[in-house]
Amino acid sequence: MKLGKALTTAILALLLASLLPTSVHFRIQAKTNLPVLNVDTELTYTTIQQAIDADETLNGHTILVEAGTYYENLMVNKSVSLVGENKFNTVIDGRALGSIIHVTASSVRITGFTIRNSMYGYSGVHIYRSTGDNISDNILRDNYNGIYMYASGNSFVENNTASGNEYGIHLYGSASVKISGNVALGNRNGIHLDVSESNIVTDNYVSLSVWNGIYLYGSSNNTLLGNRVVSNQGRGIRLHYSFNNTLLSNVVSSNGYGIYFYGSDENILTRGTVSFNNESGILLFDSANNAITSNDVSSNTFGIWLINSGDNGISGNNFTSNAEFGVRLWNSSSNIFFHNNFFGNLVKNVEQPTNTSFGNLWDDGIEGNFWGDYDGAGGYENGIGNKPYVVDERVWLGVHSQDDHPLTGQYLQFTAVVENQSCIVAVVSNSTISGFQYQNSADNRTNLISFTVDGASDGFCLISIPDVLVEPPYVVTIDGGPLSYGAVRTNGTHTWVYFTYVSSGHELTIKPLLPPEVAVWSQWWFWGMSVLVLAEIVSGGFIIRYRRKIVEQRKALQAQSPLVVAQTLFETDVERRRLKIKEFEKKYGLKIQPRNTLEDVMGGFEAKKEEEKS
């Protein structure tokens, strides 16, 4: 029995030993097939959190996550990159158990995931007191906040799609974040900046929001640039107690209200397209000292509506084809309107109850607005009407509200760039202006402005030209031929030029009037310089020959021994004195025996020395 038991034990041991390599192989094979890989260590893990927590995972490492669904709530406390294989099918599901990815480290990158189902009040991605992060190319849906940045900054939120969230992208107390290229669809608030400053929100598409497309609350010094905010139920862009923000080149269309300022001062709204909004294109409520410039505000119920708002500057806008009023003023005074175009507004260009809204100005003292229903055509040959335009027929304190300098053509603006400086060329014309171009050169000889005029039989043009683009005086041509013009005025930086033309379809150019170029050979300084150069050449030739002769003599002397040099000099001197010796001998009857060689002279010196010794 004992022998049989021992034999059985030995056999089992051999079987286990034979199976051991196979079991190790399976363990290693399973490890290499795990879905989460640390690219830097080449270690793999079952879950994303395991990969983050591993001792081998260090700051700067990249964690690659295979496609699949991961039911996790991550804590990211290392500066790592989380990279999903494909944002459409690499899913992190929070199971409504809190925030899905909570980031406390800095310099974290999260890209390539669908992040869904946070707890109410929590976030898909929650960035907490962090800097230098990059959240890009993700899908964030069905969370309270798609992306939430708290007291964070110097980060990028780019090319994400946020849908079905309470807040698509939400910043609180954060600064210097660039939010760009994102799509926010069907959230209650698309992009929300809360008590945040110095952020850039650019090139985002925000639609189907229930409350606000882009919402700034208590936020200052932010830039909203080139966003498309369309078909939101509430407000397209809303500023609430927010100051010193710049809204530039945004398209705000088909919302409840287009752009809504509430208690917000000293903001700039410029070069936007605000159209087809159900209520006001632009609404200012309790807001002052805002600049509303160069916007196209059309096909809304009201173009711009001011309530309890004063001291705003509204210029260079098109208020056209609005269903009721171009401008509506309620209890709003001391605003200034000029260089705006008002036409096609179905009820009236301006509604202004003068008992509550007075002291508004409708020109800048020189030029006013273009009014489509102005009946004072003509003018003083400078594009300005010859009688005022009455804005409100009701009289308050004995005066009408009126534009004293109405324009007789539409006010247009074109942009030209010179030396990285953007300049506005303003045109008042009854023609259609197209093909505007600016060309410049370093010598200012080919600087010119050109454009085509069309659509007016008796056309005119009043153009304001920045002197930095084309210096006055000018040459104005029409189809290549000269055209007379009048300089209306100048202020040291701009010059206003007025000219007229007959019929349409002309190309106009404006370039500087420069003195004719004179041939160089015909100018006095050319000949003066030529004489100086010739004198220098001749003098230089003499100097070169003299120096060359000295050098040659010096080389010849250096080639001889000192004795030979002395002998040569002595013989030259004897020859020079020979004639004088003969003349002396003849005159005095004496015979002089000169020493003819250097050896004779040296011998004489030796004899004299011997005589002195004796």
Image (cartoon, rainbow, N blue to C red):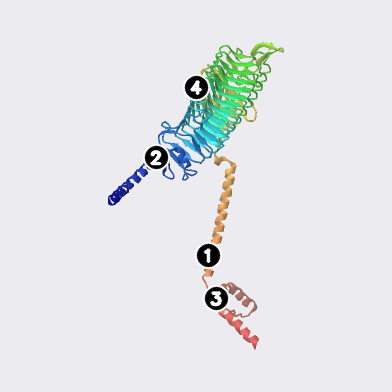
Q: Position of residue 130 (x, y in %)?
A: 55, 38
- The residue labelled by disc 3 is 563
Callout 4, which amino acid?
Leu
Residue 392 left/right relative to 91: right
588 and 77: which is toward the camera: 77
Asked if marks 2 and 3 touch (Cβ < 8 Å), the reply is no
- What residue would you read off at disc 4? 208
User: Marks 4 and 3: in contact by CB < 8 Å?
Assistant: no
- For the residues labelled 1 and 3, the Cα–Cα distance comes to 20 Å
Pick the front one: 136 or 309: 136
Q: Residue at the spot x=62%, y=17% of the render?
A: 406
Residue on which the image places disc 2: 34
- Tally the numbered discs: 4
Evaluate whether residue 109 shows in this view: yes
Q: Amino acid at mark 2?
A: Leu
Instruction: Specify which label sits upstream in the sequence, 1 or 3.
Output: 1
Residue 434: image x %, image y %? 51, 23
Image quarter of the C terminus: bottom right
The kind of residue tagged 3 is: Leu
Q: Are the residues flagged by discs 2 and 4 in contact, CB closer than 8 Å?
A: no
Nearer to us: label 2 or label 3: 2
Marks 3 and 4, Cα distance to the nearest angstrom?
113 Å
- Which one is nearer the viewer's eye here, 295 or 374? 295
Q: Which residue is mark 1?
A: 552
Q: Nearer the viewer, mark 2 or mark 4?
A: 2
